[in-house]
Amino acid sequence: MFKSCMLIALAAVAAPALAATYSQADSFSGQGFLSGFTHQAIPDPTHGRVNYVDQGTAVANNLTFASSDTFVIRADDTTVLSASGPGRNSVRLQSNKQYTTHVSVWNIRHMPQGCATWPAVWEVGADWPNQGEIDILEGVNDVAPNQATLHTNAGCTMPDGRSQTGNSVGNNCDVAATGNSGCGVQATSANSYGPGFNSAGGGFYAMERTNSFIKVWFWSRTAGNIPSDVLNGAASVNTDNWGTPFAFFPSTSCDIDSHFGPHNIIINLTLCGDWAGAVFGADGCPGDCVSYVNQNPSAFSNAYFDIAWLKVYQ
């Protein structure tokens, strides 16, 4: 009896330490994105029909716009492109800071939509794929739902039947073995991506990374079960209160500590490229992807992110 009481007492003392509580380390909104992130004017690693521009060019051409509570990045929607010239001007941002164990919470009002679009919110290490990649929000050509995906080097796989609400579309995260598909999980809600996401007023994405697991959640703006700390961008969050994630990547057969290094946060919009271009016709889009991008600037009037804020907790 005494031993049982001692165990109960010890469990009671230890319980708070087990709660997944994190304190806000960084908060980005409006102009904060301009100081906390860098515009990467680099060739698109995914071979898209885009020309990533620097911050000065992006701001001057209204491809990046910041106010007190709004941050917009978008693709050019006015220029007809020469087939022999550079791609459509667009934006790729990288956080100045790197993170390991952390939680990121995104309040997004609108995401890029339209044929040829390939928007993504993700995190990646400097030595890809050896330091891993975590895709939080990603898709192409307006095809819902959202897919969260891990990309790694060899030796990282996911078990069947894990605790998540989404549907796995591959359990081997090794890019070399999967043609860079990685191990993805699709959300079950159509309003998690593209036009459905936008018509609902957007929503909230959250990702938790530890050495034991990586989890991704989504709540539509209209959902009745958005946790209060997520909704309000609170000073601290407790992920134990967030319910079952739509994507759960445990360390059962993937040593997260060795497959994922310090990560930068990336927000980008590419067009066509290795994924959107490859399935352009199959997704019901007209003609060929590159010609569509070159000749139809007005098709990209809704190809923009409107981000209310990003909070990072550690």
Image (cartoon, rainbow, N blue to C red):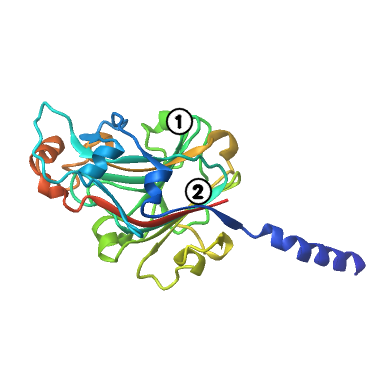
Looking at the picture, how far across and down is residue 3, in whole percent? 89, 64
Going 40% across and 57% down the picture, which residue do you hit?
A: 309
Q: Determine crowd level at label 2: few under 14, some 14-19, many 20+ residues with C-alpha closer than 10 A.
A: few
Under mark 2, the amino acid is Asp
Looking at the picture, how far across and down is residue 80, in whole percent? 8, 39
Q: Nearer the viewer, residue 204 or 26?
A: 26
Q: Quadrant of residue 178?
A: top left
The residue singled out by tag 1 in the image is 129
Furthest-bottom residue in this view: 224
Q: Nearer the viewer, residue 108 or 276?
A: 108
Of tags 1 and 2, the one toward the viewer is 1
Which element type, helix, strand or loop, lies under badge 2? Answer: loop
Q: Is 129 situated left or right of 296 in this image?
A: right
As drawn, 126 above or below 114: above
Q: CA distance from mark 1 to mark 2?
A: 23 Å
Looking at the picture, how far across and down is residue 193, in whole percent? 30, 55
Q: Is 201 situated left or right of 259 in this image?
A: left
Going 23% across and 45% down the picture, which residue do you hit?
A: 63
Q: Which mark is residue 160?
A: 2
As drawn, 60 above or below 166: above
Looking at the picture, how far across and down is residue 129, in whole percent? 45, 30
Quadrant holding the N terminus = bottom right
Furthest-top residue in this view: 84
Q: Is 173 situated left or right of 25 in this image?
A: left
Q: Quadrant of residue 177?
A: top left
